[in-house]
Amino acid sequence: MTGLAVDGDSAPTAVGQSQATATATAASIRLDDIRCAYGGVQAVNGVSFEVPAGAFIGLIGPNGAGKTTLLDCISGFNRGYSGHVYLGGQDISRWAPHKIASKSLVRTFQTPRLFRGMTVMSNLMTAPPRQIGETIRGAIFGSWKDEEQKNLVHAREVAASFSLQRVLDNYCSELSGGQERIAELARTLMADCKAILLDEPFAGVSPANRVRLAEHLVRLWQELGVTIIMVEHRLEWIEQLCSSVQVMANGRILASGTMNELRKDRQVLEAYLGAAP
């Protein structure tokens, strides 16, 4: 079925379909009647669902369905919405992005937002929250030095786990598209994230780097227990990585289930193809 068929890239092996076991570091995400309009266009129209702590879910739908706008509402980049967002049971509705990030919910974007005039290592070092050197007292009395050394050690460990050692001293402007995606993902790990929102992470990434990126996502989910919501148009990756899928169309949740179930759903087929076969 065109649009819902799973083919194309060679898939990574052993990415698994089952929901990851939630750890003490994971956080649930609950959306309650989220609505957001741009002028007369209702981009998100009454979206409600819950992502259990430690789950990896996909969010799919045709272009203009409202997926990115929904991620913007969850992460605080769009605060002009009604309804409520809960992270681990705490109401974070309409919080500023930096305040939400301080609660360990972070996001990536369709185009990676790295500091391109800085090295990969410097980008990683910007991520740890609540750094002592950010305070006047810490900066004046030098208590930041020990913490910075610990962060440097941690950054090297994270870089090694993401196979970024060889480009740590490269400017981000020198990275390939796939390397940018992986560096952005590594930076989220430096932020001690409990939940992450991914907006088309496989876009513009070479086939080889897609496989590596998928492996890193699996590790974040299965080994570290991070809660993940992923928007992605490459449905082969949604099927292989996500334990369940939410389908959006015209700002609403149209259906939910596994990709296997959704291929048989008439409403989903109509949303993607214009008419069910």
Image (cartoon, grey):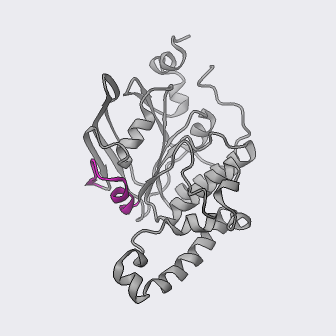
Please give left or right for residue 4 compared with residue 246 in the image: right
For the residue pair 159 and 39, the one nearer the viewer reads as 39
| 142 in relation to 256, above or below | below
For the question of whether residue 237 can be seen, the reply is yes
For the question of whether residue 219 can be seen, the reply is no
Stretch of the chain drawn in magenta: 89-104
Please give left or right for residue 167 compared with residue 1 in the image: right
Where residue 244 sits in the image (x, y, percent)? 48, 39
Residue that appears at 36% across and 45% down = 74
| 88 in relation to 11, above or below | below
Is residue 109 a member of the stretch shown in magenta? no
Residue that appears at 51% across and 18% down = 269
For the image, the number of numbered tags is: 0
Residue that appears at 49% across and 15% down = 270
Question: Which quadrant of the rendered structure holds the C terminus?
Answer: top right
Report which quarter residue 53 is drawn in: bottom left
For the residue pair 163 and 122, the one nearer the viewer reads as 122
Where residue 65 sits in the image (x, y, percent)? 44, 27
For the residue pair 155 and 29, the one nearer the viewer reads as 155
Question: Which quadrant of the rendered structure holds the N terminus?
Answer: top right
Report which quarter residue 238 is drawn in: top right
Residue furthest bottom in the image: 141
